Image: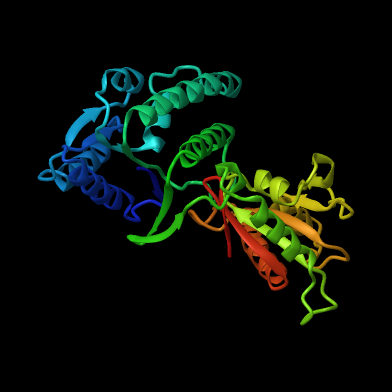
Amino acid sequence: MLTLVTGGCKNGKSSYAQDLACELAKKARSAPIYFATMIPHDSEDEARIQKHRTDRKNLGFETIEIGTNFSQIVEMLEPGRVILFDSLTALLANEFFEGRTDFSIQKMQEDAVQIVERIEKSLEKLIQKENSVVFVSDTIFCDIKYDEITELYRRNLAKLEQFVAKRCKKVVEMELGVKNEELNGDCPGSMAFTETRANEATQTFTQVSSATPLLPNCCLIVGGCYQGKTAFAKEIFSLSDEEIFVCTEDSEPDFSRRCLSHFENYIAYCIKNSLQPKTSFSDSKIIICDDIFCGVVPIDAFQRKLREETGLTLQKIAKNAELYRVFCGKAQKI
């Protein structure tokens, strides 16, 4: 069984993944393997690694360090073992930054294509070889925008997560040590979002509630950056590229378009120009917005204002909308 376990920092991902790997190994009657990806750089890293070692000390794990030699290890690995892979986040960081001297964005963008392709090929070999793999990753997508290099890293981590999620039987989101959700194929990208479900979503969207006949219906799609929101909207609502307007902070959107993407940029435009954002529309709209509400409170006053105003605006829109959240390339109806 293939499982992806993700969530915020210190929300119980590793503990849950560890228990699941032990359970699977017990059924398989073999010792589980722990793929350790972290390369320590300071005493804090060393302490974190030691804690993980202590946690699994008496659980029978065979530990294999794969920080810099993942592809070679996969080639030599005997098939049929239960693998705990912790984590995609650290593995990608190693490939992106370890030993690098040229941090120009152009060079990093060029390298990123080859890095992700190489990791995906190795992941595919691992998945084909093993009966059970529990992958761990970190949700770092619900926040404000960062510098170009950080955004490049986040975008490619999201790509790896979705690559893995499409091949997993289940995706588990951990929150406060609790298994918050299991996402089991509600997304078109997973090839499990059926035509019937898509038709139902479209019909629901186009029907205005009789309880609020004067209010136009709307579909609001939210989720962290790079999670597949636009791909989801295009598939279930048969959107063409021409029907999607990508909002910017510099001008008013084209409200005649069927879909408004990156709605948070429209809120930024309104703040800059002392305007009230639109929360109702003369015709049915599909609104796509990044979840920018988690993470550290921004130091920049404008970013704080943007986060607050976006949240308040979406609450007003949500009162008369079909709501979807897209996470790891999979969709949930809220």
Q: Position of residue 265 (x, y in %)?
A: 72, 50
Residue 139 at least partly seen: yes
The residue located at (80%, 72%) in the rendering is 208
Q: Quadrant of the C terminus?
A: bottom right
Residue at the extreme left? 58
Q: Position of residue 239 (x, y in %)?
A: 78, 46
Against 179, is 27 above or below? above
Q: Position of residue 113 (x, y in %)?
A: 55, 22
Observer-nearest residue: 76 or 48? 76
Q: How many marks?
A: 0
Residue 250 at least partly seen: no
Against 121, is 37 above or below? below
- Find residue 280 and report its image quarter: bottom right
- Find residue 45 and report its image quarter: top left
Observer-nearest residue: 277 or 62? 62
166 vs 281, left or right, is left
Q: Quadrant of the N terminus?
A: top left
Residue at the extreme bottom? 211
The residue located at (35%, 38%) in the rendering is 87
Observer-nearest residue: 127 or 99? 127
Q: How is the image coloured?
A: rainbow
Q: Position of residue 192 (x, y in %)?
A: 56, 47
